[in-house]
Structure formats: C-alpha cells, structure tokens
Image (cartoon, rainbow, N blue to C red):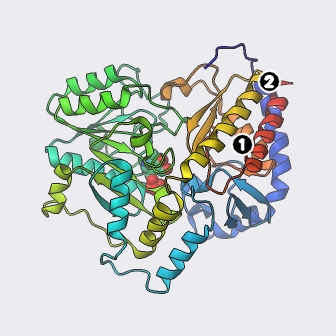
Amino acid sequence: MAVRESVEIDLDRVDRLIQEQEAELEPRHRASIEYRKNAELHVAGGVASSWQDAPPHAIFIDRGDGSRIWDIDGNEYIDYHLGYGAMVVGHAHPAIVEAIQRQASRGTHFAQPTRDLDVIGENLADRFSLPLWRFCNSGTEATLEAARLMRAKTGRDRLIKIEGTYHGHHDSLMFSVIPDPELMGPREHPVTVPQAPGIPQAFADLVRVVPFNDLAAARQAFEERPGEVAGMIVEPAMMNCGVVLPEPGYLQGLADLCHEFGAYLAFDEVKTGAALAYGGAVEAFGVVPDIVCLAKAMGGGTPCGAIGATEELFALVVGGEYDMAGTFNGNPLTMAATRATLTRVLTRDAYPALDRLHGLLHERLSAVIERHRLPAYVTGLGAKGSVIYSPTPVREYRDALGIDERITYLAWLFQQNGGVFKSPWSKQETWTLSVAHTDGDVQRYVENFETFARAVTT
Ligand SMILES: Cc1ncc(COP(=O)(O)O)c(C=O)c1O
C-alpha cells in the first residue's frame, strides 16, 4: 500500500451528515418501521436474530432476484449484504430454485441420508483437499464440532483462538469477538472476554486469545501450556474488522506450530469458503489445515454447514466413538441446494468473473480514496472485500480500534440512500459479490462512495 498524505476527517461534520442521511432514509422505511412495531408484540425485539437489528432501524425484506433485493416499502437495492455473505449465487438463481422445487415436491425431510451426499463430499474434498466431510445446519454447528473433535482426539481441553474473530454463538468459542477495550488486557497476553452474558467463566478459562498475524504470540500460547492445547481455530482471512488478509507464511506457520505441540489446526471458512476462491482460503493461501468449517455460500441460501477433516480425525466418528449428529443434518432441501451451488453455479468458472469484479471495485474505490485523500484503503479477495478507514494497514483486531464507527456508519447510510444494501453492523464496510453482480452494480457502489467521500472531505 502506497504511503500518502491523507486528510483528517472532521467528526463534527460526520455527526451532522449522519443526522441528514438518517432523516433522508426514515421516510423511505415507513412500512418497515410500522411492521416492526407489530412484530414486537410477540417476537422478542421484533426481529428473528439480534444481528438483523441495527441502527437506524431494522429493514424488512420482501424479495430478491439476482443482485437485487426489494424491501417491504418497495425500495430496490443492489445487494452487497447478500445474507451476511451466504448468497454468492445471487438471489433466486434458476438452478437453485429448480433444485429446491424438485426436492420439495419429493419430500422435505427424512432424517435419513439421500443421494446427494457422494457428489457433495467429492466436490468439497476436491476444493478443500480434505478427504472426509459431515454436514450440519450453520457455521455455529460446524465450529462447535471442530472444537469438540480436536478436544476428543487429543484428550485435551484447551483451545487457542484469534482476538476479534467470530466463530458462531456457542460457548466454546464465543470469546473476544468484539472485546470491550476496557476489558481486553495487554496485547502480549489478551484477556479472554466472554462476548455474551451467560457464558460460564469455566469455558473462558479454557480458551487462550492471541492476535492475528503473529506467529510468536501463538507460539507463546502453546509454550505456556505444553501438552494441554487441543487445537487452534483461525479465520484464515479475518472478516470482522474489514477483510484482514494473512501475511505470507502465517497460516503455514500456524499449521506447523499446532503439529509441533501435538495439536490440530482448524480453519473457520464459514465466510471465506467458496467465496474467496473455488477452494476458499485453502486454495487462495495454499495451506491445508486439519479441519475446515463451512457454511453460508456453500448452501446457496439454505441453512447449511459442513466440517471437513483428515481421516485420522474422522476415525472417531467413523468408528462410532463420537456421534456427530443432528435431526436436520443433511436435510434434503439443503443438500439439493448445496449440490446445485457447488456443481452448477459456484463452479471453477465462476471465480475469474468474481475476481474481475473485485478488481474493478478495488481499482475504482482506490481512485476515489486517492482523489479525496481519504485515510482509508481497499482490501479483499474474490467475492469479499472492504474499505478500511485507516491510513495504515490493519494486521490484527487492535489495529482497527482507532477507527471511528461513525465514519463507517455514515458510509453505510450513503450507500443505503443510494440504493445499495450493505450488511447492518457493517462497521468496517465489508461487502460480498455474487455471480449476478454486474459492472453497472459496481459503478453504483463507487458513485455512492464518491458522494460520501466528497461530503466528508469538503
Ligand atoms: C467466521 C464465522 N464463523 C461462524 C459463523 C457462524 O455462522 P452461523 O451464523 O451460520 O451460525 C459466522 C457467522 O457470521 C462467521 O462469520
């Protein structure tokens, strides 16, 4: 990244612009605001998931088609939220619709294996270079199984995770996701901060948190507890503070370190798998871990999840000592959509087009940043990317702490008002691209970004 002089953003002006942008948005969301009031009567908070509610208010969606969605007020948006990155296939893709409809007419659930399994298993083995797979219903379930499998195989209880990453909402790993700076302790030895009330301290005591992109810190964590660490889980490219890519050698270094200490390495590819590249981070960064956790993009918009691992690790499951189970695991609708996604939509041929669009966004957004001398830069890979509002590269969670969330919120508001839907809580401007996005869709994003850049700098 070229070092250049950037302007300082005036936060009073940002506050004023937020008020203006919110005032412009509110009348356009009357139906959403009203609907929520009714929903609130019998649905806690009026939304299905806490992360569907973010300032300025929850926005209820009516339908989607290709790269577009429409809210219940009738506003049309180009969708860069894509269901928190799950819809890399785009909305209502004909191949996915056809697969789901065909299966729905033949039965939606049996809790018995169906005939999509072999094709999906083979496809995932090819993509992620791990021989064996099992299926579940979410990213949370996939990482829960990964944590348990590493513990089961080693007979050890301790885990290592990265500060500032999210692996789902189970008690084994929901620590230091967005830790309160007051509680997070020194960088040399971060405190493991529970991300929600109700998580027992006993679980926190088993998890050591380390900064991303720092092999020495990971080594120190292993050396503190020789023979006690079952494994380490890492999001191979961090997606929670913008997209933070691994530095060369970091992921292979982690794999070697885990093995040196008799532990396992799990990649949480819930966001990166089938999104960064055909073979996710495994292919993009050329490192094969012991476990890969998948969800989101693989299922073409159905509730999905998968865990891939070595034969050695899966021996416990195959041998019947470890029941990796769930009523809806391998649900026929999910499997039909997953098969269509993997073999008909997100094939190898899909990725050069995603890379090209990413390149276009990257280049044009960087030009806007340059023109307006914003303290920011563009980062990402394949279908995922972000603008990071920092003049210097963010290598780990703590580097992003100085970024004022009002700036990212304002950027989000300008996109909303300009007809682009980005993830709520999009604190660091992360976007997802789909196979349905076009050059025109990219241009809309860039134009909104330029309007924002002009407004904050002049
Ligand atoms: C990296 C990562 N892992 C796990 C999860 C949890 O997945 P799910 O929401 O499907 O349970 C998420 C969700 O956003 C995620 O980003």
Q: How much space separates mark 1 and mark 2, taking CA atoms? A: 20 Å
Residue 263 lies, in percent from the top left, at 20, 37
Q: Taking 221 as reference, is 355 above or below it?
A: below
- Residue at horizontal 42 percent and vertical 35 percent from the top: 285
Please determine whether, in this image, residue 368 is positioned above or below residue 149: above
Is 39 on the left or on the right of 325, as rendered?
right
Q: Secondary structure at mark 2?
A: helix
| Residue at which label 1 appears | 412
Residue drawn where x is 29% and y is 50% of the image: 130
Q: Kindly give the residue lying farthest to the front in the view shown.
A: 349
Check disc 1 and report its element: helix, strand or loop. Answer: helix
Q: Which quarter of the figure has residue 109?
A: bottom left
Amino acid type, residue under disc 1 in the picture: Trp
Taking the image as shown, residue 318 lies to the left or right of residue 446, namely left
> Which mark identifies residue 371?
2
Whether residue 229 sits left or right of residue 13 in the image: it is left
Quadrant containing the N terminus in the rendered view: top right
* Dot 2 beta carbon under 8 Å from ligand 1: no
Camera-side residue of 280 and 104: 280
Spot occupied by residue 108 in the image (x, y as percentages of width and height)? 44, 81
Q: Residue at x 80, y 65 (%)?
A: 74
* Amino acid marked by disc 2: Arg
Question: Looking at the picture, does residue 366 appear above or below residue 334?
Answer: above
Instruction: Tell me where residue 50 sits by quadrant.
Output: bottom right
